[in-house]
Image (tube, rainbow, N blue to C red):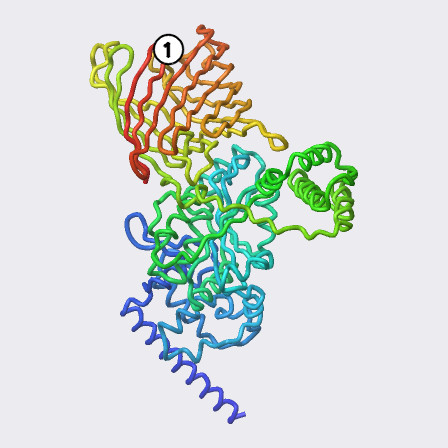
């Protein structure tokens, strides 16, 4: 018993001595500001506060070892290192070293003398690494998808490839794994989603999944093209990214649609691997997915190569364009009835194969979700076509679509825009104007790198200053002229097999410029639907639009409705030079002013990259106005 007491005393003394020694080492490290090491700070997602100090963007208590760790890097550093150095007493996978392998890796660098205490084996983490088998990393950009608000500006995720060379792994990329960051959405209401997304009301979480899930979602379900940006990372940097992805299981982030979104957090993962890049830091406060790609492009030595994966829609269209008239005729007949294969006996063997291959791709496109259900009608139809195809002794040719150089997202204009200019109204009132647009693109912007038939704007603010306003007794006036929280126009040209509705939507406010009132500033919501046609050099559209305006000055009811035709023609003389003619004629309800009209002509010319000039004339019911402005994209 005495011997046991003696041994216990020695162990307690040694433990106390070791603890004291560790505390001294940590104290010295803090004196040397090692707790502010850039990689360590990135791994804990600390950012400088608005006025002083630091605050971590991670929002889960389980991510920190000190109760004040979210806002105090020094206390969290001390608590984290102490936790990492704890003796293993239970399951290895529950030890801090196994939950936070990136912190463990950084601690080994900061404390070489303690490395032998930072070598606990972690079975679950090692299985995770082996499962990923990451030899290279890509940032994946899925193209703009206007039918879903969350994807209207694209989406980015990270892919881990099992091959160092992307060409070598091209045939096996569906076996890779992906890491996605997205909001854990708790509502189906679009308005509530928008408000909560802008206000950080959802939990943002990282998800680890097979890459083919995302390919199926983007390429097939939503017919979005996928751009793969293969990165030049060292083995050590890849290992760090993988370890930090593992750590992300311990936390969640407030999801902010305009700031802490998928774009931002893909860059924050890379910043942990190499803090010298400062990728997230180099982005503006508000960030959209294409900003991620532009940041990578502008980082010397980071981008290795770019690969393109066409959507199912693009693939089908390419197959149809390669058919001769006879093959197209048989495809037309088959597309009218998928219940069974038609008789192709009059075709050559090669033509039979082409018709059946195109038919199955078209089935996959048209019934993207139903085709995966075993007993669904489309899956039954496809099995019949597969049987028919198996009887044709011709190997299907690998589809090699032309690389769409002009559509590469990184080649597009910058996402933000400022404009300054001036003009004159019909009453000879001169004015100056200033505009700020948060993002992203309208129908007259240079279409390279963007969807040429889409107008996607968020956060457009327009102000005007009038030195003298004659109707106001020659007094000066500064006013908020127009605001768009969101404005979308989706021109879907009429095409055989692929036509969808052309539609538009706007939510914001504006100055009323008809006879209903004088300088009324009113909230406005507008939707429209119709059709469009794209002749390459010319696009035209016709919508039936309905809008509601709310103001106590606009009618006795405090609001009015308007509905009627809204049409336009866009002449695309060159990517840098485009002209638009537009007009609308609305029947007004609940307003003494029964009809209003507006027509305009706009010319825009891009002088050089990210710099354009514009001249426009607009005629409203009450007056006309002409303006000229300079636009700068940044």
Quarter of the rendering containing residue 429: top left
Residue 561 in the image, given as x and y percentages of width and height:
49, 15
Tell me the element at label 1.
loop
Quadrant position of the C terminus in the picture: top left
Is residue 296 positioned above or below 200 on the image? below
Is residue 469 positioned above or below 484 on the image? above
Which residue is disc 1 drawn over?
Answer: 517
As drawn, is 529 to the left or to the right of 619?
Answer: right
Quadrant position of the N terminus in the picture: bottom right
Residue 600 in the image, given as x and y percentages of width and height:
38, 17
Q: Nearer the viewer, residue 497 or 584?
A: 497
**Can residue 59 be seen here?**
no
Q: Residue at x 41, y 31 (%)?
A: 442
> Could you classify mark 1 by the number of other residues whose Cα lies within 10 Å: few (under 14), some (14-19), or many (20 or more)?
some
Q: Nearer the viewer, residue 94 or 278?
A: 278
Is residue 401 positioned above or below 468 on the image? below
Q: Nearer the viewer, residue 390 or 280?
A: 390
Q: Residue at x 68, y 37 (%)?
A: 327
As drawn, is 431 to the left or to the right of 318?
Answer: left
Q: Residue at x 67, y 50 (%)?
A: 396
Is residue 513 positioned above or below 10 on the image? above
**Can residue 244 be seen here?**
yes
Residue 426 in the image, given as x and y percentages of width and height:
29, 11
Residue 105 in the image, given as x and y percentages of width and height:
43, 70
């Amino acid at each position: 018993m005495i011997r046991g007491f003696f041994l216990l005393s020695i162990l307690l003394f040694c433990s106390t001595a070791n603890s004291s020694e560790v505390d001294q080492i940590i104290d010295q490290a803090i004196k040397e500001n090692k707790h502010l090491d850039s990689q360590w700070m990135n791994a804990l997602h600390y950012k400088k506060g608005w006025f002083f100090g630091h605050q971590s963007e991670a929002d889960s208590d389980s991510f920190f070892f000190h109760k004040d760790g979210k806002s105090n890097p020094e206390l969290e550093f001390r608590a984290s290192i102490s936790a990492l150095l704890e003796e293993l007493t239970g399951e290895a996978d529950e030890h801090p070293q196994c939950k936070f392998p990136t912190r463990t890796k950084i601690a080994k660098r900061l404390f070489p003398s303690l490395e032998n205490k930072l070598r606990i084996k972690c079975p679950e983490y090692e299985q995770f690494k082996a499962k990923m088998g990451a030899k290279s990393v890509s940032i994946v950009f899925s193209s703009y998808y206007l039918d879903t608000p969350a994807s209207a500006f694209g989406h980015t995720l990270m892919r881990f490839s099992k091959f160092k060379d992307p060409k070598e792994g091209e045939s096996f990329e569906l076996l890779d794994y992906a890491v996605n960051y997205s909001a854990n959405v708790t509502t189906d209401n679009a308005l509530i989603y928008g408000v909560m997304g802008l206000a950080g009301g959802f939990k943002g979480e990282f998800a680890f999944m097979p890459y083919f899930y995302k390919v199926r979602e983007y390429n097939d379900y939503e017919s979005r093209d996928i751009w793969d940006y293969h990165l030049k990372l060292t083995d050590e940097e890849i290992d760090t990214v993988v370890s930090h992805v593992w750590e992300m299981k311990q936390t969640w982030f407030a999801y902010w649609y305009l700031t802490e979104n998928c774009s931002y957090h893909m860059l924050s993962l890379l910043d942990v691997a190499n803090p010298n890049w400062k990728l997230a830091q180099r982005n503006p406060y508000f960030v959209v997915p294409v900003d991620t790609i532009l940041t990578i492009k502008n980082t010397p030595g980071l981008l290795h190569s770019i690969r393109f994966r066409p959507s199912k829609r693009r693939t089908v269209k390419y197959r149809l364009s390669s058919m001769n008239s006879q093959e197209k005729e048989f495809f037309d007949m088959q597309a009218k009835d998928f219940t069974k294969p038609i008789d192709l006996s009059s075709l050559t063997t090669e033509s039979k194969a082409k018709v059946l291959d195109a038919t199955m791709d078209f089935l996959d496109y048209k019934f993207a979700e139903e085709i995966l259900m075993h007993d669904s009608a489309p899956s039954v139809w496809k099995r019949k076509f597969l049987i028919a195809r198996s009887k044709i002794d011709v190997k299907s040719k690998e589809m090699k679509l032309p690389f769409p150089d002009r559509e590469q997202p990184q080649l597009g204009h910058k996402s933000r825009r400022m404009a300054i200019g001036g003009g004159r109204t019909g009453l000879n009132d001169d004015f100056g104007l200033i505009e700020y647009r948060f993002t992203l693109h309208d129908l007259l912007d240079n279409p390279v790198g963007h969807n040429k038939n889409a107008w996607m704007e968020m956060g457009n603010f327009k102000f005007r200053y009038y030195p003298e306003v004659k109707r106001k007794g020659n007094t000066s006036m500064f006013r908020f002229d127009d605001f768009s929280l969101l404005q979308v126009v989706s021109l879907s040209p009429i095409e055989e097999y692929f036509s969808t509705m052309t539609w538009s939507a706007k939510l914001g406010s504006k100055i009323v410029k008809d006879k209903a009132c004088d300088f009324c500033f009113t909230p406005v919501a507008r939707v429209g639907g119709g059709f469009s046609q794209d002749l390459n050099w010319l696009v035209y559209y016709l919508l039936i639009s309905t809008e509601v305006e709310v103001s106590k000055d606009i009618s006795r009811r405090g609001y009015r409705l308007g509905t009627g035709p809204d049409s336009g023609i866009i002449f695309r003389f060159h990517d840098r030079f485009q002209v638009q003619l537009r007009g609308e004629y609305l029947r007004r309800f609940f307003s003494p002013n029964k009809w209003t009209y507006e027509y305009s002509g706009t010319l825009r010319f891009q002088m050089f990259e990210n710099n354009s000039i514009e001249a426009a004339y607009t005629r409203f019911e009450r007056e006309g106005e002409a303006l000229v402005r300079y636009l700068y994209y940044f």
